[in-house]
Image (cartoon, rainbow, N blue to C red):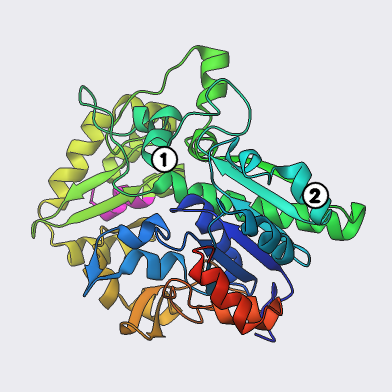
Amino acid sequence: MAHLPLKNVKVIELANGLAGPGIGTFLSDYGAEVIKIEHPKKGDMLRTYPHMKNGVPLYFKVMARNKKTITLDLHTEESKEILTDLLKDADVLTESFRPGVMERFGLGYEAIKAINPCVVMARLSAYGQTGPYSKKPGFATVADAFSGLAYQQGHPEKQPLLAPYGYSDQVAAIIGAYAVMTALYERDTISQEGQELDLTIYQGPYTFVGPHVTWYDQLHCVTERMGNRVPNAAPRNLYKTKDKKWLVVACSSPSMFERICKSIGREDLLTQDDLQTSEGRVARVDEIDDIMQSWAGTKTLQEALEIMEANEVASGPVLSVEDIFSDPHYQARGDIVTVEDDELGSVKMQNVLFGMSRTPGEVRYAGQKMGASNIEIYRDQLGYSEEKIAELKEKGVI
């Protein structure tokens, strides 16, 4: 832990599922001590998610990695005193209840601030702490639709497409970790005070889908579904190769279009004035895609990639996770890490999100069994006696 950049940051996690816990995951990867609190009987919802191996929840193993898991029932009288003890030297509290729930527990921001004014309280919900929808439930699927993301995904004349995984949750988690670090930097360099962060699941994809707000404001333009195309570049699509695999090609500049034309033996396209601009190429996108598909259909994926790469074209294969496991680039960069685990023996998962030359993050262990760190936290950190811990357990508090 000595080299980890966040080794002195302590996080109390009251979040459940993907988005809220994802904040803690990204912080813990770089050394933050994340104490994950779960209900003694229910546990985190991810413990019930498929796929499982011999009853062990694999998704939880990934999202709860590097965290210390303890149990605590917030509905009990004793829980507030225990949480107070946990928060006294904490830097961050994350929670993902619907707005108002923490207040009903007597643990709203003002109460947290009274316990420890230096705590950054990251509050993540579907729609945020304010606004007419703030009390509505919602997950990534709903956020995909509400944010405008789903409306733009899919093929013309077909239904909008939702992401087949918790995309908006993971985006919210990354934004949440960024927000926490911004607040900690402000606290430590300017004010010496914590603050309340109002985070949503929908605002990440709403921001990241492109300049659709500005386009609509200035041009009354609504971005419609275009399949694998984009409204400002061509060619940009998937092309099926002779061996029934998929080649992706992206063109975002005149020089890239020139390289593509050389790759497919169509230098004649470079003599046509209208194809020298993105606007002109987009206007003839059907024709360009037909040309690209005709060429790709005569090549195997490997042949197509070799030609494209020889001409420095931005291109690549569509990889399945099986392909990723054998890909030399993923292997060389260590993007898949093997972690020893007391339930699975060992488990492979995605490595940390970014590299650092001097203080790199690391996956130290996978998600623990429920309550695995109770003794370490309650006895060793808070100083509770064995008798008190046994009593709390008997009463169902922990």
Q: Is residue 60 left or right of residue 385?
A: left
Name the residue carrying label 1: 139
Q: Is residue 176 magenta?
A: no
Residue 298 vs 398, above or below: the answer is: above
Magenta region, residue range: 259-266
- Lower position in the chain sequence, tag 1 or tag 2: 2
Badge 2 density bin: few <14, some 14–19, many ≥20, Cα 10 Å:
some
Instruction: Check disc 1 and give the amino acid type.
Output: Phe
Instruction: Check disc 2 and give the amino acid type.
Output: Lys
Residue 23 vs 28, above or below: the answer is: above
* Quadrant (top left, top right, bottom left, bottom right) of the N terminus: bottom right
- Residue 113, numbered circle: 2
Q: Is residue 262 magenta?
A: yes
- Residue 187, numbered circle: none
Residue 117 vs 128, above or below: the answer is: below
User: Which residue appears at 40% of the width and 23% of the height?
Assistant: 223
Task: Answer with the quarter of the image where residue 180 lies.
Answer: bottom right
SS state under label 2? helix
